[in-house]
Image (cartoon, grey):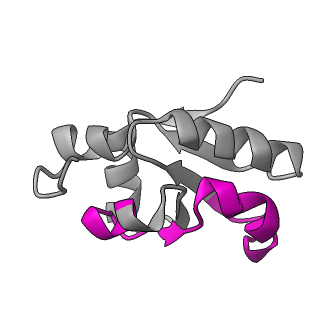
Amino acid sequence: MSVPEIQAEELKHRLDKGDKLLLLDVRDEYEYEISNIGGHLIPLAELPKRFTELNARQEIVAVCKMGPRGVKAVEFLKKHGFQKVSNLSGGIHAWSDRVDRKVRKY
């Protein structure tokens, strides 16, 4: 399954212009506490139990540390009928490198 991705710079631009995106952070809680960009936290392991908390009509961007968990989250959500879902390419590390260096890498 091909997973749509969004680059950190494009995500920043869309957020700045007010696009209504849900950032879905799929990292573990301790990672979110270290560093985050304000996403809604549902760890990947909990997604099968909690995906009904999400609005399938809303555009969702999955965020993880470097990308792989985000890909898995997108694949899962697509299999469950979510159409407008993508992965932040390179994860929070890409955001830190290319958008906001104050966001801590770990």
96 relative to 14 in the view: left or right:
left
Along the line of sight, the residue nearer the viewer: 91 or 56: 91
In percent of the image, x 38 and y 66: which residue is there? Answer: 30
Please state the total of marks drawn on the protein image: 0
Question: Residue 36's spot in the image, x, y percent?
Answer: 32, 63
In percent of the image, x 71 and y 60: which residue is there? Answer: 47
Question: Residue 41's spot in the image, x, y percent?
Answer: 52, 69
Whether residue 17 is visible: no
38 relative to 46 in the view: left or right:
left
38 relative to 83 in the view: left or right:
left
Looking at the image, residue 12 lies above or below residue 40: above
Q: Residue furthest bottom?
A: 53
Along the line of sight, the residue nearer the viewer: 45 or 104: 45
Along the line of sight, the residue nearer the viewer: 12 or 31: 31
Quadrant the N terminus occupies: top right
Q: Residue furthest top?
A: 2
Whether residue 29 is visible: yes
> Picture quarter containing residue 66?
top left
In percent of the image, x 54 and y 56: which residue is there? Answer: 26
* Magenta-span inclusion, residue 43: yes
67 relative to 100 in the view: left or right:
right
In percent of the image, x 38 and y 33: which residue is there? Answer: 90
Question: Residue 31's spot in the image, x, y percent?
Answer: 36, 59
| Segment tinted magenta in the rendering | 31-59
Along the line of sight, the residue nearer the viewer: 16 or 106: 106
Question: Residue 93's spot in the image, x, y percent?
Answer: 28, 41
* Magenta-span inclusion, residue 85: no
